[in-house]
Image: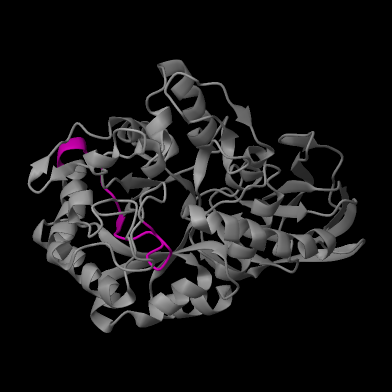
Amino acid sequence: MNVRSVVKTLLLSVVIALPILATGCASAQTVVTVDPAIKYQTLQGWGVSLAWWAKVVGGYPTAAREQIMHMMFDPKTGLGLNVVRYNIGGGENPEYRTGEDRWRFLPFRAAIPGYETTSGQWDWSADENQRRILQEAIKMGANQLEAFSNSPPWWMTISGSVTGSKIAHEDNLSPQYYNAFADYLTGVVKHFHDDWGITFQTLEPFNEPTGDWRFGNGQEGCNFARPTQNIIIKDVANALRTKGLKTTIAASDEPSIENALATFDAYDSEALGDLSQINTHTYWGWSRFELRKEVYAAKKNLWMSEYGDGDPSGLRMAREITMDMRELQPTAWVYWQALDSVGGWGFIRNDMRNYTDTAFTVNNKYYVMGQYARYIRPGFVFVDINSPDSIAAYSAKQKRFVIVTLNSKKTENTITYDLSKLNKVSRKITAIRTTATEHWSPVSGITLKEGKFTVTEPAESVTTYIIQTR
């Protein structure tokens, strides 16, 4: 997430969120119908990027680190996240890692080491903290793994820094290093596979490539014009084939849905043929239907690979999840930061300035995320539900339907759920709710009568309904 984009995102949040809070939920006594005959995407999973929090938490004492890991990845006691995006660091120019300017260029949490410190000089002991988190997440069930790059190594850049170009919106990867960059990314992926037994399903060479990455901006970032992206995708594909890797390429991780659509349309047939997956961020944008239509028509997988916001309540995130899963229909939904030092951006708040200050505050956002991730699990198929505030999914293996509904209003909301199109439904409905004062709290007394059940959902709440079939 580009720090300059944060301001724009927050402003857009105000513009977008206010009408949602006022009118977003179904009106009182609304009847909401689930139709399992209308099927959509199959879920690969819910996830999180490891940049930058894993670099910090990976250095925590064992007990503190394990507590965070269970909160994020344990499917029984935590969120049960199974999608992990590992950041292949560029590694900053040593000139900007010393003196008074060292934190202006890359703050402690965002200073991700690179593996190739100069041309041909590899350091496989680098980035041990983020790698430790990745390995532990895999042990706890993470099985959808993607490697992504925020910037090429500093010595490949035009500006001499992984933070961006000295001229706004210009490419920062020197053309003489196109092949070297492809070799760097695929060399890391191969080493993970051969030496550490970790296979990335996908490799993403870019992060918000048409953003605004400027020299000294405080995090790794690199612009890639769309014609350049075509070249890099082909170079990375050739490097993967040369190294005998089965990892495929994802792109383009643009910051907005509109950017993602424009970039997708700019790929030539060869570059598009080298892609297995399209990634988009949804910090802003409205063309979810259009992007989904084009991506799936091209027979590519689709991920919502990054979203974050500063609302600690989680209500804005819940709105985003609902819109994305209903309209964009990605097979994976990935949040940006598990831990963050800034307001409500993380599920958990921590200063992220060292490895010793392990105290944290849990944002309500954490529990809201759990209303989705704990109950709609990988392999569930999303089905139709005629409410803009709800998503529904079904597991044939578990014989279970799950509905998650957001009431973002400041008043309670009464809804009748019509399950008459579901076969052999148990009369007992299990419900779990999160509000400002309730965290994954059971809701009792809900029973099915004539194929329907009626509930009054509290103001500013997210409720999960589990319906077992026979």
How is colour applied across the structure in the image? one colour
Overall secondary structure of the magenta section: loop
Q: Nearer the viewer, residue 222 or 105?
A: 105
Q: Is residue 308 left or right of residue 416?
A: left
Q: Nearer the viewer, residue 437 or 350?
A: 350
In this view, 63 is above or below 410? above
Magenta segment includes 218: no
- Report the number of discs: 0
**Picture coordinates of residue 173, whole percent (x, y):** 23, 62
Q: Residue at the spot x=19%, y=31% of the render? A: 125
Q: Nearer the viewer, residue 76 or 92?
A: 92
**Picture coordinates of residue 349, whole percent (x, y):** 58, 33
In this view, 230 is above or below 64? below
Quadrant assignment, res 210: bottom left
Regarding residue 55, the answer to whether it shows in the image is yes
Regarding residue 419, the answer to whether it shows in the image is no
**Picture coordinates of residue 251, whole percent (x, y):** 35, 65
Q: Which residues are magenta?
A: 194-214
What is the residue that sits farthest to the left in this orientation? Answer: 120
**Picture coordinates of residue 296, whole percent (x, y):** 44, 75
Q: Is residue 238 left or right of residue 277?
A: left
Q: Nearer the viewer, residue 394 or 293?
A: 293
Q: Residue at the spot x=32%, y=79% of the render? A: 267
In this view, 446 is above or below 267? above
Quadrant assignment, res 389: bottom right
Q: Is residue 121 left or right of residue 391?
A: left
Magenta segment includes 196: yes
